[in-house]
Image (cartoon, rainbow, N blue to C red):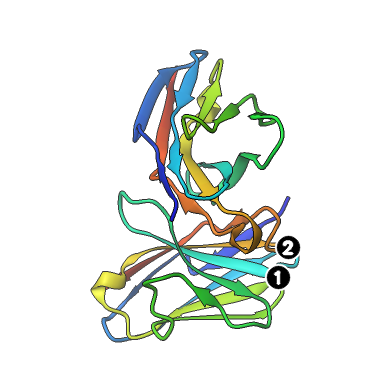
Amino acid sequence: AQSVTQLDSQVPVFEEAPVELRCNYSSSVSVYLFWYVQYPNQGLQLLLKYLSGSTLVESINGFEAEFNKSQTSFHLRKPSVHISDTAEYFCAVSGGGTSYGKLTFGQGTILTVHP
Amino acid sequence: GAVVSQHPSWVICKSGTSVKIECRSLDFQATTMFWYRQFPKQSLMLMATSNEGSKATYEQGVEKDKFLINHASLTLSTLTVTSAHPEDSSFYICSAARTSQETQYFGPGTRLLVL
């Protein structure tokens, strides 16, 4: 069985400040890790994913996440946030093979960027 | 980009009636679609996986006779909640992928309220 814990339900920050959204997972098998973002009134969108290779993955809009196997974490970071980054962020995990795509989600973290 | 729609966006029904929710991939063909449910302040929970032309695979604890899933074409999957009860009130979200090994694209969700 797999589980995902997002430690913060809400994270308020000021514009241009750095932010870290925390995600820890537990699994008895190798995992693939994802971060999804949900803007108001829209569906979840894939932000970035770790499948294999480099443990540091980046998105096109400046977010990055690092897979840390020893700490079973996949924290999401951005060095300088914008107002437009205000959204809810979900961390998710899936197994491989036929289990790939069967996502287990965390409870979400609402990021609010204040001017 | 890949767009997934859901219809209706919200529905209110009486206890004991059945409700059908549609999930459509608008600009791509999806061999695999997933159905999730999200209760207030909880994470998305995978209910079932459907592959076009095959019977859906349900997650443990999800009643297949209550939540009927049909994936008859490469652009449409339907979830029918049969004999709905107030405890079925939830936010139902679908996602679609070209194949089971590729990125999922999420619909905006359907909010169901059973009175």
Local SS, label 1: loop
Q: Name the residue beneath numbered marker 2.
A: B98
Q: Looking at this view, is A110 or B54 the one in front?
A: B54
Chain name for mark 1: B
Q: Is residue B99 left or right of residue B11?
A: right
The percent position of residue B34, horizontal first and vertical second, equals 56, 65
Q: Are marks 1 and 2 in contact (CB under 8 Å)?
A: yes
Residue A106 or residue A89, whichever sits in front: A106
Q: What is the total number of numbered labels drawn onto the structure image?
A: 2
Q: Residue at x 35, y 32 (%)?
A: A8
Residue B115 showing in the rendered view: no
Among the 4 quarters of the image, the one containing residue B95: bottom right
* Image mark for residue B92: none
- Look at 68% across and 77% down and name the residue there: B52
**Residue bearing the label numbered 1:** B31
Label 1 amino acid? Thr
Q: Secondary structure at mark 2?
A: loop
Q: Are marks 1 and 2 on the same chain?
A: yes
Residue A109 lies, in percent from the top left, at 40, 36
What's the CA distance linking mark 1 and mark 2? 5 Å
Where the N terminus of chain A falls, by quadrant? bottom left
Q: Is residue A79 visible?
A: yes
